Image (cartoon, rainbow, N blue to C red):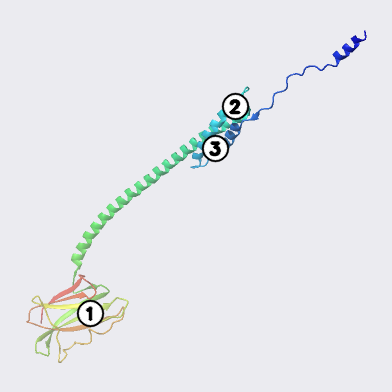
Amino acid sequence: MSDEPQKSYQSDTTPQSQGTQPAAAKKVSGMAIAGLVLGIIGVIFSFIPIINNAAFVLGILGLIFGIVGIRASRADGPKSGRGLSIAAVVLCVLAMVITLVMQQAASNAIDEATSSVSASLSSETSDTSASDSSNTSDSSNTSDSSDTSSASDSTLDTEGDLGDYHLKIVSATSAGADYNGKDTVMVTYEWTNNSDEATSFATAFMPYVYQNGVSLDTAIYTQSPAGYDPQSELSQVQPGSSSTATVGYTLDDSSPVQVEVEGLALYHGPKVTHTFQLS
């Protein structure tokens, strides 16, 4: 009888069998984290022109990492972080969409700017062409008018402007004989200095006297005829002042003489001319 209590005691103190141990915690998927980081960077870069090309590439990589993370974080999968993977996929897709929208907007803006510039250049070219055509027409008309005017004004009878000077052929009269005994004609000129510098008749004008189409030589007098001043050609005349010059020429006969004066500094410029009958 002494053995039964002992058995009961031993039965009560025998340890119960242990239950199943709890499952170990899963690690967060590295692909999910990488995809989330790439998605965030991609969204930021997607708003920046040119750089958003890199954002599109980051979005593609992040999308791949996010999909891999979703598959690895299934209920029976070896990893956790399903929410991070889904967020990564959403951000990466958003980065790619924003990049495409921004690039399309930039392309449209460039096209509009190019069209505007082209239209502006075309308008300016058209205006310039029209202006050139008008100017050419005006120039042609002006040239024709100028040629006609030049043709009519190239020869001035008795009086006119020769550059900065005004000249009048006053008279051509017989003036006795020169030192060789040849008959002469004395031509009287009145002129005004409209330039900014003092000058003389000899440095302002180039006079010619023709008889029978041949120019006459300058006369040299042993006895000056009435009204003749041998220094009048060389006398300096101040700006705004007027003077008279007298020049003698030897005659070939008694036929008319033609006096012609050009500006010394003018090439193919206007001429003042007049034909005189000798008396």
Task: Assign the C terminus to one quadrant of the image.
Answer: bottom left
Say which amino acid is labelled 1.
Answer: Glu
* Residue 214 x, y percent position in the rendering: 10, 77
Q: What element carries label 2?
A: helix
Q: Are marks 2 and 3 in contact (CB under 8 Å)?
A: no
Q: In front: 153, or 107?
A: 107
Quarter of the image for residue 206 reads bottom left
- Which residue lies under the disc numbered 1? 190
Q: How far apart are marks 1 and 3 (CA)?
A: 95 Å
Q: Return the mark for residue 24.
A: none
For the residue labelled by badge 1, is the local secondary structure a helix, a strand or a loop?
strand
Which residue appears at 42% of the width and 44% of the height?
113
For discs 2 and 3, the disc positioned in front in the rendered view: 2
Is residue 188 placed above or below 62 in the rendered structure? below
Circle 3 residue: 42
Q: Where is residue 269 in the image (x, y as percent from the top left)?
A: 21, 70
Kindly identify which residue carries mark 2.
Answer: 72
* Residue 168 sits in quarter: bottom left
